Amino acid sequence: ILTGRQVYKQYKEYSQEKLSLCGWVRSNRDSRDFGFLVINDGTFFEPIQIVYGKELSNFTEVKKLSVGTAVIVKGILTETPDARQPFEIQAESVEVEGESPSDYPLQKKRHSFEYLRTIAHLRPRANTFQAVYRVRSLIAYAIHKFFMERDFVYVHTPIISGQDCEGAGEMFQVTTLDLEELSQGKKLDYREDFFERETSLTVSGQLNGEVFAQAFRNIYTFGPTFRAEESNTTRHAAEFWMIEPEMAFADLKDNMLLAEKMIKYIIKYVLEQAPEEMEFFNKFVDKGLLDRLRHVAESEFARVTYTEAIDILKEHNDKFQYPVSWGTDLQTEHERYLTEKVFKKPVFVTDYPKEIKAFYMKQNPDGKTVAAVDLLVPGIGEIIGGSQREDDLDKLRMRMEELKMNLSDYDFYLDLRKYGSARHSGFGLGFERMVMYVTGMANIRDVIPFPRTAGKCEF
Ligand code: 4AD
Ligand code: MG
């Protein structure tokens, strides 16, 4: 049985040939003596039209097939140069593999994304989600391809972690302790826990990534990360994937060059590999998406320091819910204003105040800022967060003491600064935010197959 993709890619070679296809019914229109069955097997975005007539032994049964039915069709491929689809299949037989009763929740009409979220087990069959999840899969491949072509080593960093890399305290605890006993007054003692210490789901693979960068020079991670962020927004999930390259003998400029190349590479790859899906997004999800992405892939990203960004934003403080001044963290509204209204393209913001960034970032000579970089993009805001890392043992130790961190948890990390400490930099790309950016989808819940957000975790 051929796939829809195989047939689409080579329909001219199959012209007038007899072939077998399978798929699920998208629509079924019938007249008295013939009918049109539109099926899709998920391997190609465009569906395939099957024409059937009275010569089918089960003609009356096929006429009644409803949306969602799984079928196997045998028939002759006929080219249809004037129709929307370049060919159709003249059915010789239509075999029912699995029926779909009329209460099937996905009918031919357009359903709202909100409704589709309530049927996460069926929405992958809907057009939009066929496109989203295929593009998601392609972006993942493009990322591996990008890094492999540049000789980066892919490192699997642990999911269960003993550190809070970002120091934001947004961790999901992992424990085998008996919560019931604890609630009845038993004293909490992590020595009795599975790992004989406190552990949590990782918020970032960076610290482990740095270990490997000091051995392999250029590495990347690509895995799930977890944050117990209460913020109920369209761009935060409790479980999301992150790509974290780390490069030894590289500074903040090298970091930005890599990030810019990577983003452009991903965009070009998807435009090339998923033209049907991208046309669909451009038409039905985000008008103008294609032109914007093509432009981004060809033009240079903007660069601005945090201090310069604050000076620009201060002029527009009346427009913000939270006015800014030097030292305030940038909120989504500020990030979007910068990238959408001021620069009108992706913009790197560098050198943030050290107080609003993580402990590991390299301190700048001014004593106030660190060598941090965020990449902001229109429609989303922050898509990448990164930095050059502090490679000076004493400075790092002092900063960690200032922040009252438990240094004994970080012996391994300090050792990296003790033995052959090489200047190094890296960043984290939020995978789902990248999928949103490329597809134009507005809600992170609609680019994750099974989203986990505050108050929501279904199968
Ligand atoms: O800026 P963040 O917190 O940076 C780090 O975790 C660093 N350790 C990365 C590094 O330098 N290796 O997170 C990186 C990116 C953000 O820019 C954002 O795109 C994404 O991860 N992100 C989230 N995406 C979805 N839901 C959330 N709750 C996210 N939190 C961060
Ligand atoms: Mg960040």
Image (spheres, helix red, strand yellow):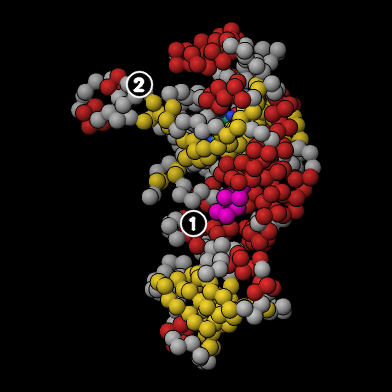
What residue is pinned by disc 2?
Answer: 197
Rendered image: mark on residue 114? 1
- Relative placement, left or right, of 200 versus 212 is left
Q: Is 138 part of what is drawn in magenta?
A: yes
Residue ID at (46%, 47%) = 451
- Relative placement, left or right, of 457 versus 133 is left
Rendered image: mark on residue 334? none
- Relative placement, left or right, of 278 versus 444 is right
- At which x and y percent is residue 401? 51, 10
Mark 1 closeness class: few <14, some 14–19, many ≥20 residues within 10 Å = few
Hey, what amino acid is under mark 2? Arg
Q: Is residue 69 depicted above or below 418 in this figure? A: below
Numbered label tally? 2
Splitting the image into four quadrants, where does ligand 1 fall? top right
Dominant SS type (magenta): helix
Hey, what amino acid is under mark 1? Glu
Task: Please indicate, yes or no, whether residue 27 appears anywhere in the rendered image.
Answer: no
Indicate the secondary structure of the residue bearing disc 2.
Answer: loop
Q: Quadrant of residue 326?
A: top right
- At which x and y percent is residue 353? 64, 20
Identify which residue, 232 or 32, lies in the foreground.
32
Residue ID at (61%, 25%) = 216
Task: Please indicate, yes or no, whether residue 453 appears anywhere in the rendered image.
Answer: yes
Q: Is residue 91 depicted above or below 217 in this figure? A: below
- At which x and y percent is residue 113? 52, 57
Give the magenta-colored segment's residue range: 132-139
